[in-house]
Every structure is written in C-alpha cells, then in structure tokens.
Amino acid sequence: MNFLPESQIHSKLNNHRSIEQWLGNYKLQDTYIIRFVTLHNDPKEGFYCWYGDFEDVGNENYCDIYSLYSIDEENEYGNRVEFSNIEEMLDFCYNTLKASPDKFVGKGMLQDIYLEYLKTR
C-alpha cells in the first residue's frame, strides 16, 4: 500500500482533497467491526472528519467500505466533527482516534485496504 508521506498530508488537504485512514478492526460478540476516518477540507463546509466503528458485512465479492453502517444507531453513517483548521483536525485524529501520521491514504484507497483485510479475516 502506498501511504502518503507526512509532508503530503497538508498539501492534499490544502488542495481540498480528502484523505483517509484505516484505524483497525475487532470482533464484538459475533460481529466484525472496522474503524476508519476520512478527513475533509471542503471549500463550502470547511474542515471536518467522519469517523466511526462500522459493522463489517463485506466479503471479497462485496467490498464497498463506504456503504457500511455505523454500529452507533444514532449516527448510522458515523460521527462528523468540525474544526477551525487542519492542525486542529489532525490533533483530534492523532490524540483522540490514535491515527498515525504515516498511515494516511488518498480518498478511495481505503477500499483497497479493506479488500486486503477481507482476504485475511
């Protein structure tokens, strides 16, 4: 997998390109759960991220990570948090979500990580 160099994180976000990170997986009773975060810098909506724990119902024939639903019944698409700047958003990801500065990928690449995970689950 080609992870973004740390130097490109700001560049991508400053150019209004989203980035993502796989945050892990676990099993809750008989259900597989995955965690990920997507960071955005939208010209109209500003800085925000979507994150959450999602029920993993995928398989090698159905691997659309973006169609999964959150296990949080009140936020079926995950949690959205807004920020005033990139640094505040990254601090939240690193400190609260335990994201790693060297594991971000460009938008859409998370799908490939998910498919690799499904092959070994």
Image (cartoon, rainbow, N blue to C red):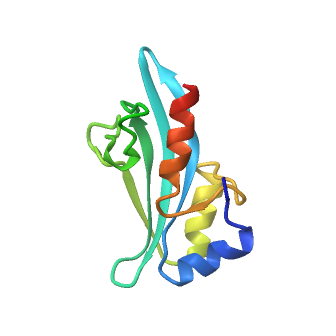
- Taking depth in this image into account, of 116 and 44 the one nearest to the observer is 116
Find the residue positioned furthest to the top.
Answer: 29
**Residue 38 placed where, x, y %?**
48, 59
Relative vertical location of residue 101 with respect to residue 15 in this rendering, above or below: above
User: Residue placed at 54% from the left, 25% from the top?
Assistant: 121
29 on left or right of 24? left
79 on left or right of 99? left
121 on left or right of 2? left
User: Residue placed at 58% from the left, 44% from the top?
Assistant: 23
**Residue 43 placed where, x, y %?**
39, 84
**Residue 59 placed where, x, y %?**
41, 30
User: Residue placed at 49% from the left, 75% from the top?
Assistant: 17
**Residue 52 placed where, x, y %?**
44, 45
Answer with the quarter of the image where residue 89 lies: bottom right
Relative vertical location of residue 60 with respect to residue 83 in this rendering, above or below: above
User: Residue placed at 42% from the left, 15% from the top?
Assistant: 30
- Taking depth in this image into account, of 38 and 80 the one nearest to the observer is 38
Q: How many marks?
A: 0
Relative vertical location of residue 42 with respect to residue 75 in this rendering, above or below: below
